[in-house]
Image: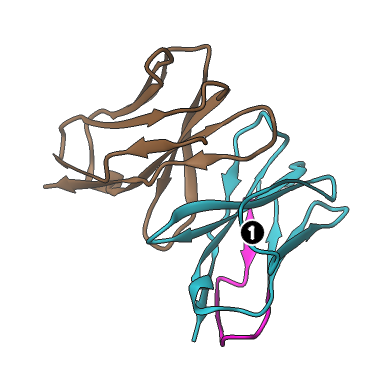
Chain colours: A brown, B cyan
Amino acid sequence: GEDVEQSLFLSVREGDSSVINCTYTDSSSTYLYWYKQEPGAGLQLLTYIFSNMDMKQDQRLTVLLNKKDKHLSLRIADTQTGDSAIYFCAEGNNYGQNFVFGPGTRLSVLP
Amino acid sequence: KAGVTQTPRYLIKTRGQQVTLSCSPISGHRSVSWYQQTPGQGLQFLFEYFSETQRNKGNFPGRFSGRQFSNSRSEMNVSTLELGDSALYLCASSRDSNQPQHFGDGTRLSIL
């Protein structure tokens, strides 16, 4: 079945870049998403990329997609304490909104 | 533009009771999906509704059900509550299948 994997924890220093990685198995995935969840809140859509793209940049966020290896990454430049949260990778396709989420990566930003 | 609204935010029930959660999607969004989030299992897909019809269903028992109204608002019902149903229930809406989902802040359900 479909599966999405992420490392569970990442710690970085304030001002450094963070790179959160994700691997997925469903080759029919059409869209790949990054969501952010802060304590006590729902999921906030950060960015997404279509499977026919290999890169997308949005201010401090850069998404890289290696479709051959089914590997997705999210780079956060100049990481701030406000970026501390859990980041979820998710895959979806055109065949209904049955998103599959990864377990989430808890990003801790150290001062 | 208002986001996805879920009510109530918090709910405490006891085993055997039933509960109904509500979700109002973003205006213009016709697809509503429900997820259960627990520390042990992560985010699990419950079901998706589009134009009042259930279009996709996850692997949950029949105690979990839902419906969608003509204005796209959706409700989720859980009957005969069990301790293991304690979770954050998240609702997400989108215009259609090929559009990103936007999430509400969830309803935190605690079963005593």
As helix, strand or loop, the secondary structure at mark 1 comes to strand
Q: Position of residue B20 (x, y in %)?
A: 70, 73
> Is residue B39 highlighted in magenta?
no
Q: Is residue A2 above or below residue B86?
A: above
Q: Position of A43 compared to B47: left or right? A: left
> Is residue B18 highlighted in magenta?
yes
Q: Residue furthest right?
A: B70
Q: Residue beneath label 1, please? A: B5
Q: Residue at x 38, y 60 (%)?
A: B40
Q: Position of residue B1 (x, y in %)?
A: 66, 46
Q: Position of residue A23 (x, y in %)?
A: 37, 29
Q: Position of residue A40 (x, y in %)?
A: 42, 63
Instruction: Give the letter of the chain under mark 1.
Output: B
Quadrant position of residue A50: top right
Quadrant position of residue B18: bottom right
Q: Residue at x 85, y 50 (%)?
A: B52
Residue A104 in sight here: yes
Which residue is more in the foreground, B111 or B95? Answer: B111
Q: Is residue A51 above or below residue B109?
A: above
Q: Residue at x 60, y 34 (%)?
A: B100
How many numbered tags mark residues here? 1
Q: Residue at x 53, y 71 (%)?
A: B85
**Which three-letter amino acid code belongs to the residue tagged 1?**
Thr
Q: Is residue B10 above or below residue B5?
A: below
Residue A60 in sight here: no
How busy is the neighbourhood of tag 1: few (under 14 within 10 Å), some, or many (20 plus)? many
Boundaries of the magenta span: B2-19
